[in-house]
């Protein structure tokens, strides 16, 4: 998966988990080994990979022109709710929408509208 911000190819945590489970598209043992070796420190870090929120991270999210405004807005809200780094929260949101969200664009928009109606 290429990073949504146009940066170098970075594996999501979900992709790493899929590789560990043997369910990825990678079938050659040398490919699997290379990917796991590349991300070994991150695998060892586990949940400590995720950082706490920071003003600099929030500013980077706000300045990123490659991320749609509604995604930035929701990502920043998720960051506050989960107490996670703003950039990582946006990445988690993008991963969820890409890999796990099973609704339609219209249902996503209606969820967004309902969320704004709340105080």
Image (cartoon, rainbow, N blue to C red):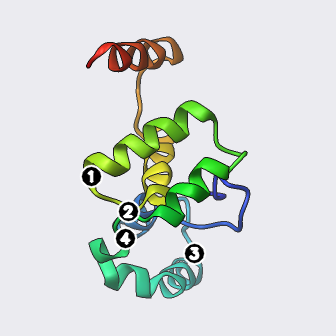
Report the disc number at residue 28.
3
Callout 1 crowding tier (Cα within 10 Å): few <14, some 14–19, many ≥20 = few
Q: Comparing marks 2 and 1, which lies closer to the viewer? A: 2
Up the image or down, 77 lies above or below 102; here it is below
User: Mark 2 or mark 1: which comes first in sequence?
Assistant: 2
Q: Position of residue 51 (x, y in %)?
A: 37, 70
Q: Which residue is mark 4?
A: 51
Report the disc number at residue 53.
2
Q: Secondary structure at mark 4?
A: loop
Q: Comparing marks 3 and 1, which lies closer to the viewer? A: 1
Mark 3–mark 1 distance (CA, rounded to whole Å): 37 Å
Q: Nearer the viewer, residue 1 or 54?
A: 54
Callout 4 crowding tier (Cα within 10 Å): few <14, some 14–19, many ≥20 = some
Q: Secondary structure at mark 1?
A: helix
Mark 3–mark 1 CB contact (< 8 Å): no
Mark 2–mark 1 distance (CA, rounded to whole Å): 9 Å
Mark 4–mark 3 distance (CA, rounded to whole Å): 33 Å
Give the quadrant of residue 96: top left
Q: Position of residue 9 (x, y in %)?
A: 67, 66
Which residue is pictured at 58% across the width and 52% down the height? 61
Question: In the image, 55: left or right of 79?
Answer: right
Q: Position of residue 115 (x, y in %)?
A: 34, 20
Q: Comparing marks 4 and 3, which lies closer to the viewer? A: 4
Which residue is pictured at 49% across the width and 49% down the height? 90
Q: Which residue is mark 1?
A: 82
Q: Nearer the viewer, residue 23 or 55?
A: 55
Callout 3 crowding tier (Cα within 10 Å): few <14, some 14–19, many ≥20 = few
């Amino acid at each position: 998966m290429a990073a949504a911000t146009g940066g170098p190819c970075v594996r999501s945590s979900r992709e790493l988990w899929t590789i560990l489970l043997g369910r990825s598209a990678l079938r050659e043992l040398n490919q699997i080994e290379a990917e796991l070796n590349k991300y070994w420190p991150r695998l060892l870090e586990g949940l400590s990979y995720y950082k706490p929120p920071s003003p600099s991270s929030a500013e980077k999210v706000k300045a990123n022109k490659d991320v749609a405004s509604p995604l930035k807005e929701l990502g920043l809200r998720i960051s506050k709710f989960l107490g996670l780094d703003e950039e990582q929260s946006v990445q988690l949101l993008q991963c969820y929408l890409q890999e796990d969200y099973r609704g339609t664009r219209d249902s996503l928009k209606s969820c967004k509208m309902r969320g704004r109606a709340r105080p």
